Each structure stands twice: as C-alpha cells, then as structure tokens.
Image (cartoon, rainbow, N blue to C red):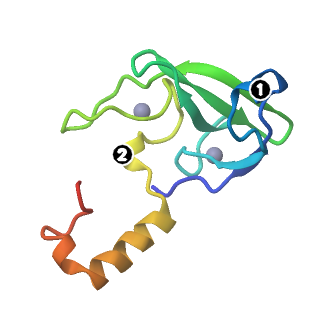
C-alpha cells in the first residue's frame, strides 16, 4: 500500500528548543499506510531501540507528541515493523513511499549494474 500523504508543520516544544541544534519548525510526513484509521503519525526519535519511540500524532484539530511502544510484528526475514504498537494500517514493510519507489526505479534503469537482482541496493 502507498504511504499516507498527510503532513504537518511541527514546532519543537518550548521545553526542548534549548536542547536542539536546529529548533526551527519543520514539516513531517505521516509514515502510516494510506487510508489508516485514527491520527496520523511520524517517528521523531527512538527512545532506546528496545521500548519504543516518541511519535508526533496529529489530526485536523491537534498535534501531540507521545511515546509509543514498537509494533511487535516481524516480517518473514525477521525484520521488525518500524511503526508503533497497535497502528491501524499495514506494517512498515507493506507501506511504500511512492516518491522513493519512483526514484529507485529511475536509479535502477539508469544504473542497472547497481541492482544485480532487481532490488534496491543493500536490500
Ligand atoms: Zn496518515
Ligand atoms: Zn506493525
């Protein structure tokens, strides 16, 4: 499934601006699959690699930052889902950023020697 196209301009919380190297507002893009239920979401930072991360979750009325545990699912190759637990759409391996996919296709056509098996380099 394609990635959701929602985005939001996110301003760093006032209590964090002193800790950030670049505390300017920035756009963040939803990482969930299109047509998902509930709020949009994007990972802001990983808490420790094990327990979860801090996510921006937003809808038409508000944006909030909150910690969420990782989704416990793994794919057939043992790679963990990169979304939060109980997300509503497909797992991260099912979500395709169409812009990134188009860029990979252009790269594959222009530099086929980098894609010996037709996949993405390093994949
Ligand atoms: Zn979304
Ligand atoms: Zn998942």
**Image position, residue 5 (x, y; %):** 63, 57
On residue 61, the disc is none
Chain-order first, disc 2 or disc 1: 1
Which residue is at the front of the view, 121 or 102? 121
Q: Nearer the viewer, mark 2 or mark 1?
A: 1
Give the answer, above or below, for where 32 lies relative to 54: below
SS of the residue under disc 2: helix
Q: Which residue is mark 2?
A: 93
- Residue shown at the point (52%, 31%) measured from the top left: 87
Q: Which image quadrant for residue 113?
A: bottom left
- Residue shown at the point (56%, 52%) measured from the top left: 34
On residue 18, the disc is 1
SS of the residue under disc 1: helix
Question: Quick one: label 2, few (<14), some, or many (20+) residues within 10 Å?
Answer: some
| Left or right: 116 as drawn, with respect to 51 | left
Which residue is at the front of the view, 28 or 18? 18
Q: Are marks 2 and 1 in contact (CB under 8 Å)?
A: no
Q: Which quarter of the frame holds ligand 2?
A: top left
| Left or right: 45 as drawn, with respect to 110 | right
| Left or right: 99 as drawn, with respect to 6 | left
As measured in the structure, the alpha-carbon distance from the residue carrying label 2 to the one carrying label 1 is: 35 Å
**Image position, residue 79 (x, y; %):** 27, 35
| Left or right: 16 as drawn, with respect to 94 | right
**Image position, residue 117 (x, y; %):** 13, 67
Question: Quick one: label 1, few (<14), some, or many (20+) residues within 10 Å?
Answer: few
Most extreme residue toward the bottom is 110
């Amino acid at each position: 499934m394609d990635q959701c196209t929602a985005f939001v301009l996110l301003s760093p919380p006032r209590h964090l601006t002193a800790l950030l190297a670049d505390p300017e507002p920035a756009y963040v893009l939803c990482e969930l699959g299109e047509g998902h239920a509930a709020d949009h979401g994007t990972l802001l930072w990983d808490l420790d690699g094990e327990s979860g991360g801090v996510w921006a979750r937003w809808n038409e009325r508000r944006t909030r930052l909150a910690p969420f545990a990782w989704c416990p699912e793994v794919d057939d190759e043992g790679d963990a889902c990169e979304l939060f637990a109980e997300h509503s759409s497909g797992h991260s391996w099912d979500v395709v950023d169409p812009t990134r996919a188009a860029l990979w296709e252009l790269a594959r056509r222009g530099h086929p020697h980098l894609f010996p098996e037709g996949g993405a380099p390093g994949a």
